[in-house]
Amino acid sequence: MGLGLYVTTSESTLGAIAMRTLPSLVRFVLLAVLAAGCTPQGVRDFFDNGGPEIIGHLISGVAYTDPTADFTAIQSVAVFPMHNTSFAPAESRELNRRITQVIEQKNPTIEILGPVEVNDRLNDHGLADDYNVFLAHSASGRTPDREMLGQLRAALGTDAILQAEIVQVIQEDSQFGGDKSFTRVRVRYSVLDCHKGKVLWEASGDGQRSTTTMPEGASPIVEAVELAVYKILDIMPRFGPVPR
């Protein structure tokens, strides 16, 4: 038995307020369980099976789109592996699958080069280390290296690249009588034009996975990342010509 409440908001402050109401929610559910005729053992079983749970999905920031961006001119996209992660292979594959699915749903004719193929080609062309430097410069806010983007285009054979990185991770375990445990991440996605050497689109999102006030470890990072990725993919632009 369990109670789920999904909170979605575009205002992080509103989401934080909603999260702080958890202790009163726990008390409310406990009274409801007792009122329904559950025995004390039944109440213990209720909480042993997970108890009430809140999943907070907080999105911060607004997507940036270059005023001159022409997404209809993009015929092919290279999807890079998410940076700053330590996911299990199966978790990475699942995230990558969802990303490619969203791109294909928006335009089934778009050519997609997946993360595995991207890594293989970077290694084959000796560009893996150079790309890591490129990422570090991007994270610091520098203008994209047009020469490096040209090399990526030559190696990958795509018009644009989609790169993602985890830019912040906060985790806290719960304790008896204390705050809930939570994992919160910030994920950033960028679409870069390999021809013009510039950022066409960028968006960031915060995903938070929270549990009850019972002693419990913080949720795995990948669960919070999935929440953030879902929302970002919803607003990702469509690539390729518009159907007539």
Image (cartoon, grey):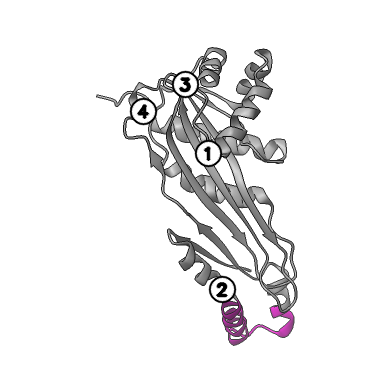
Kind of residue at disc 2: Arg
Q: Is residue 17 above or below residue 148?
A: below
Residue 45 shown left or right of residue 52 in the figure: right
Report the residue marked by disc 1. 141
Give the Cα distance between marks 3 and 2.
Answer: 45 Å
Kind of residue at disc 1: Gly
> Is 152 covered by the magenta stretch?
no
Give the mark, 3 or 2, whose residue is nearer the N terminus: 2
Q: Is residue 164 visible?
A: no
Report the residue marked by disc 2. 20
Task: Assign a secondary structure to mark 1.
Answer: loop
> Is 25 covered by the magenta stretch?
yes
Give the mark, 1 or 2, whose residue is nearer the N terminus: 2
Task: Assign a secondary structure to mark 4.
Answer: helix
Report the residue marked by disc 4. 71
The residue shown at (65%, 65%) is 211
The residue shown at (33%, 27%) is 70
Give the mark, 3 or 4, whose residue is nearer the N terminus: 4
Find residue 218 and report its horizontal and vertical position in percent. 70, 60
Judge the density around disc 3: few (<14), some (14-19), many (≥20) Cα neighbours within 10 Å. many
The answer to whether the residues at label 4 and label 1 have Cβ atoms under 8 Å apart is: no
Magenta residues, as a range?
Answer: 23-43
Image quadrant where residue 106 sits: top left
Give the Cα distance between marks 1 and 2.
Answer: 34 Å
In this view, the mark in front (4 or 1): 1
Task: Assign a secondary structure to mark 2.
Answer: helix
The answer to whether the residues at label 1 and label 3 have Cβ atoms under 8 Å apart is: no
* Residue nearest the observer in this picture, 17 or 31: 17
Image quadrant where residue 184 sits: bottom right
Kind of residue at disc 4: Phe
